Amino acid sequence: MSNIYDTAYGMEKAIRDSNEYADLKRLYELVNSDASTKGMFENFRTLQMQLQQKQMMGEEISPEEVEQAQKTVQLVQQNPTISQLMEAEQRMSLVIADLNKIIMKPLEELYGPSDK
């Protein structure tokens, strides 16, 4: 029987070798290579993190914050490089979600609803 951690490190290598990761890395480096694009992306990420943190703490997000977030999203989506990066992030997120489903399957089967 193989060591579960060896398998996990093998999965890490497979992720790093995947087309999805290579595309994500290339686009991330492209965004960071232009100061204006990098600043715009960092502002977007900061705002996104602040709003997520408020949600996790159960705090209300004000209408002004929602409006600011919508404007920021519209602005970054107009930048083709950032837009492509966000699409690559979504594809990588789907891969991770699929892997998580596969990894969690034994526990779901063990603790899932019984047919008895």
Image (cartoon, helix red, strand yellow):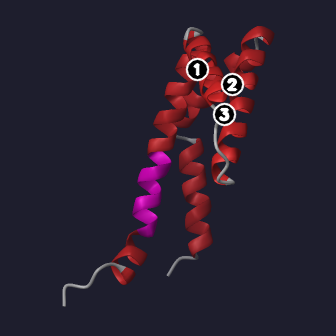
Q: Which kind of residue does numbered mark 3 sit on?
A: Gln
Q: Residue 47's x, y, as percent?
A: 71, 30
Judge from the rendering whether residue 103 lies leftward or rightward of residue 36; answer left or right.
left
Q: Residue at x 69, y 54 (%)?
A: 57
- Disc sitting over residue 73 in the figure: 1
Secondary structure mostly seen in magenta is helix
Q: CA distance from mark 3 to mark 2?
A: 6 Å
What type is the residue that disc 1 sits on? Answer: Val
Q: How crowded is the residue under tag 1: few (<14 C-alpha within 10 Å), some, or many (20+)?
A: some
Q: Are marks 3 and 2 in contact (CB under 8 Å)?
A: yes
**Amino acid type at mark 2:** Phe
Residue identifier under label 3: 48
Considering depth in this image, is 97 or 8 the residue closer to the camera?
Answer: 97
Residue 106 location (% of width, % of height): 39, 76
The span picked out in magenta is 95-104
Q: Is residue 23 visible?
A: yes
